[in-house]
Image (cartoon, grey):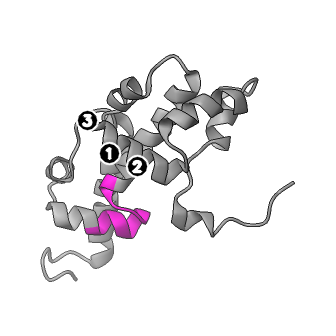
């Protein structure tokens, strides 16, 4: 039994996981909107600190980090199209600071967005978009060391 709710711990854990999934789904759906941890937490009746701790425990990263990864993945797709400037892409994915966007993009992808835009069009030429998305998915620095041996 939980001392706070009086419910069995596993029942409370399932309710928390359902709320965390709702937060993750909202981020996936509304990544281009101005989202912050406080607003996300209010939406599922949790404190911002509790949401952050529980989200990290469940998904391995903070809600903000998850949001930025979604934004960068979408930015990569827009940059591959090649018809928008880096600044236009920055604002289209919900970032309000070009500097923060560029820094985070470079951290996740390994090259600045302008370089990615220039090189991605050549690298994915002729590839179906669904394959290009998988091939160009950002890899966090901590995940890079976990990759197995090359498949080919």
Asked if the residue at tag 1 contacts the one at tag 2, i.e. Cβ–Cβ closer than 8 Å, the answer is: yes
- Judging by the rendered image, the residue that carries numbered circle 1 is 100
Judge by depth and name the residue closer to the eye, 46 or 30.
Answer: 30
Q: Can you tell which quarter of the image residue 60 is in? A: bottom left
Q: Which residues are magenta?
A: 53-64
- Judging by the rendered image, the residue that carries numbered circle 3 is 96
Q: Is residue 11 left or right of residue 146?
A: left
Asked if the residue at tag 2 contacts the one at tag 3, i.e. Cβ–Cβ closer than 8 Å, the answer is: no
Q: Is residue 84 above or below residue 2?
A: above
Q: Is residue 4 magenta?
A: no
Question: What is the spatial separation of the Cα atoms under label 1 and label 3, in whole angstroms?
Answer: 8 Å
Q: Position of residue 125 (x, y in %)?
A: 73, 25
Q: Can you tell which quarter of the image residue 6 is in? A: bottom left
Where disc 3 sits, the SS reads loop
Q: Residues within 10 Å of mark 2 (few under 14, many from 20)?
A: some
- Judging by the rendered image, the residue that carries numbered circle 2 is 104
Residue beneath the point at 53% across and 67% down? 142
Residue beneath the point at 36% across and 52% down? 21
Q: Is residue 122 left or right of residue 60?
A: right
Q: Is residue 124 visible?
A: no
Residue beneath the point at 61% across and 37% down? 133
Judge by depth and name the residue closer to the eye, 87 or 148.
Answer: 87
Q: Residues within 10 Å of mark 3 (few under 14, many from 20)?
A: few
**Among the two numbered marks 3 and 2 on one chain, the one whose residue lies closer to the N terminus:** 3
Asked if the residue at tag 3 contacts the one at tag 1, i.e. Cβ–Cβ closer than 8 Å, the answer is: yes
Where disc 1 sits, the SS reads helix
- Split into 4 quadrants, where in the image is the N terminus? bottom left
């Amino acid at each position: 039994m939980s001392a706070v709710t009086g419910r069995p711990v596993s029942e409370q854990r399932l309710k928390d996981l359902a709320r965390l999934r709702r937060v993750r789904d909202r981020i996936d759906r509304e990544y281009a909107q101005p989202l912050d941890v406080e607003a996300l937490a209010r939406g599922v009746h949790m404190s911002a600190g509790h949401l952050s701790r529980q989200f990290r425990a469940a998904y391995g990263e903070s809600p903000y980090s998850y949001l930025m990864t979604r934004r960068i993945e979408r930015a990569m797709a827009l940059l591959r199209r090649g018809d928008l400037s880096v600044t236009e892409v920055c604002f289209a994915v919900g970032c309000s600071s070009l500097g923060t966007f560029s820094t985070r993009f470079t951290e996740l992808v390994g090259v600045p967005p302008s370089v990615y835009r220039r090189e991605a069009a050549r690298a994915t030429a002729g590839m179906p978009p669904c394959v290009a998305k998988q091939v160009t998915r950002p890899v966090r620095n901590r995940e890079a060391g976990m990759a197995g041996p090359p498949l080919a």
